[in-house]
Image (tube, rainbow, N blue to C red):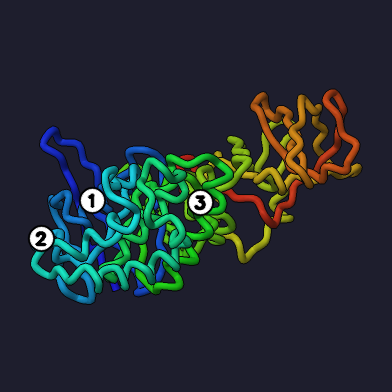
């Protein structure tokens, strides 16, 4: 198990990159550090790797602190954004390199046997004699993973490893990464700013913002049960619709947008709704086309995305989105009546705390 306790990082200029991080990662799990640029996710990875020192706090591997250990003694493998392959070496030579240097180096023949196992795992046995400039970006990425795994590390660190690949290749490679690390059984920490990558491959996700973990949970819960407004807005595509509404005796509403309090589900309420105003979050799929709906909207435009289409319209003067079946005959300029799925909406205080 990896335990991160009260981890802080403050730079000399006073910038606080991490503001007290606590995290537990089970053996063999694939955990993603997700968040916008500058949120601190790579800082955590670099402290684990020994590239940076923390200002405060500790990191324990199986109960033993690694903070004062030299990076080479931390039993980690790391794959960087640029892969860092040696251009003058073949694929095989790149992979065996970590095994043939240092105090614990082994004979070349033994190293090759180990490398062959990991080349099979990563589907690169057929390119072992080629050099990095002779293979594709996806193949280079697999080489970097194989090189990180040959020393059988306790932990594998992946820092934005797919950012240099085109969109289609990223889809296939991220599936391969999950298959590889699960086959090997190595505990893996994956850093990305791409929510689709995180949601598709992770056992758990730590969603970060401004040096703080906003929510650490299984992927489904970040979408279905966001801890706060930041999580709700960050996770989900198309992005959630958020409206500032007034709280009255029987509704939370403004102008023509009306949330009937009587239709709210009791067991979803996290506290009494006593504040004057709230932010109400409605995911695009929780608007419904409904001939009897209370709300009428004018479709501004539409996007076709296969089975579904996204309708764009305005509510309370702000751009809004809903997802509907692409078979529906709805076109720009149409007036459409819609209703709101009260069981699935979210209600937040003005500072972003979720109350429903």
Q: Considering depth in this image, is 276 or 230 the residue closer to the camera?
A: 230
Count of residue discs: 3
Relative height, residue 66 to residue 144 (above, below): below
Is residue 270 in view?
no
From the image, tell me which residue sits under label 2: 70
Identified at 58% across, 48% down, the residue is 347
Disc 1 packing (10 Å; few <14; some 14–19; many ≥20): some
Q: Considering depth in this image, is 81 or 141 the residue closer to the camera?
A: 141
Label 2: element kind: loop
Asked if the residue under mark 2 is in contact with the one under mark 3, i.e. CB atoms within 8 Å, the reply is: no
Residue 101 image position (x, y, % from top left): 14, 61
Disc 3 packing (10 Å; few <14; some 14–19; many ≥20): some
Residue 164 image position (x, y, % from top left): 43, 40
From the image, tell me which residue sits under label 3: 197
Identified at 67% across, 55% down, the residue is 344
Q: CA distance from mark 3 to mark 2?
A: 31 Å
Q: CA distance from mark 1 to mark 2?
A: 13 Å
Is residue 218 in view?
yes
Q: CA distance from mark 3 to mark 1?
A: 20 Å
Identified at 18% across, 71% down, the residue is 107
Q: Considering depth in this image, is 50 or 144 the residue closer to the camera?
A: 144
Q: Is residue 151 left or right of residue 285?
A: left
Residue 310 image position (x, y, % from top left): 73, 37
Disc 3 or 2, which lies upstream in sequence?
2
On the rendered image, what quadrant is the C terminus found in?
Answer: bottom right
Label 3: element kind: helix
Relative height, residue 184 to residue 239 (above, below): below
Q: Considering depth in this image, is 107 or 185 the residue closer to the camera?
A: 107
Asked if the residue under mark 1 is in contact with the one under mark 3, i.e. CB atoms within 8 Å, the reply is: no
Q: Which mark is residue 46?
A: 1
Disc 3 or 1, which lies upstream in sequence?
1
């Amino acid at each position: 198990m990896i335990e991160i306790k009260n981890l802080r990082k403050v730079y000399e200029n006073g910038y606080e990159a991490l503001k007290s991080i606590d995290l537990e990662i089970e053996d063999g799990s694939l955990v993603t550090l997700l968040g916008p640029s500058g949120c601190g996710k790579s800082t955590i990875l670099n402290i684990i790797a020994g590239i940076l020192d923390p200002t405060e706090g500790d990191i324990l591997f199986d109960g033993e602190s690694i903070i004062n250990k030299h990076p080479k003694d931390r039993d980690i493998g790391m794959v960087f954004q640029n892969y860092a392959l040696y251009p003058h070496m073949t694929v095989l030579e790149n992979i065996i390199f970590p095994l043939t240097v240092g105090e614990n180096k082994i004979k070349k023949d033994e190293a090759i046997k180990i490398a062959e196992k990991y080349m099979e795992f990563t589907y690169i046995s057929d390119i072992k004699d080629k050099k990095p400039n002779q293979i594709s970006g996806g193949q280079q990425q697999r080489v970097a993973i194989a090189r990180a795994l040959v020393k059988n590390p306790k932990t594998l660190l992946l820092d934005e490893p797919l950012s240099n690949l085109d969109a289609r290749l990223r889809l296939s490679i991220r599936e391969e990464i999950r298959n590889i690390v699960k086959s090997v059984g190595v505990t893996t920490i994956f850093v990305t700013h791409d929510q689709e990558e995180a949601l598709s491959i992770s056992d758990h996700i730590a969603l970060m913002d401004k040096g703080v973990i906003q929510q650490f949970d299984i992927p489904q819960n970040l979408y279905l049960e966001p801890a706060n407004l930041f999580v709700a807005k960050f996770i989900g595509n198309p992005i959630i619709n958020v409206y500032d509404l007034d709280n009255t005796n029987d509704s939370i509403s403004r102008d023509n947008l009306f949330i009937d309090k009587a239709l709210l589900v009791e067991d979803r309420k996290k506290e009494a709704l006593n504040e004057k105003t709230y932010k109400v979050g409605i995911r695009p799929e929780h608007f419904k086309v409904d001939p009897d709906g209370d709300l009428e909207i004018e479709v501004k435009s539409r996007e076709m995305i296969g089975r579904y289409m996204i309708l764009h319209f305005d509510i309370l003067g702000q751009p809004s989105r809903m997802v509907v079946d692409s078979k529906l005959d709805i076109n720009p300029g149409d007036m459409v009546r819609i209703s709101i799925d009260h069981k699935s909406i979210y209600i937040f205080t003005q500072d972003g705390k979720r109350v429903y």
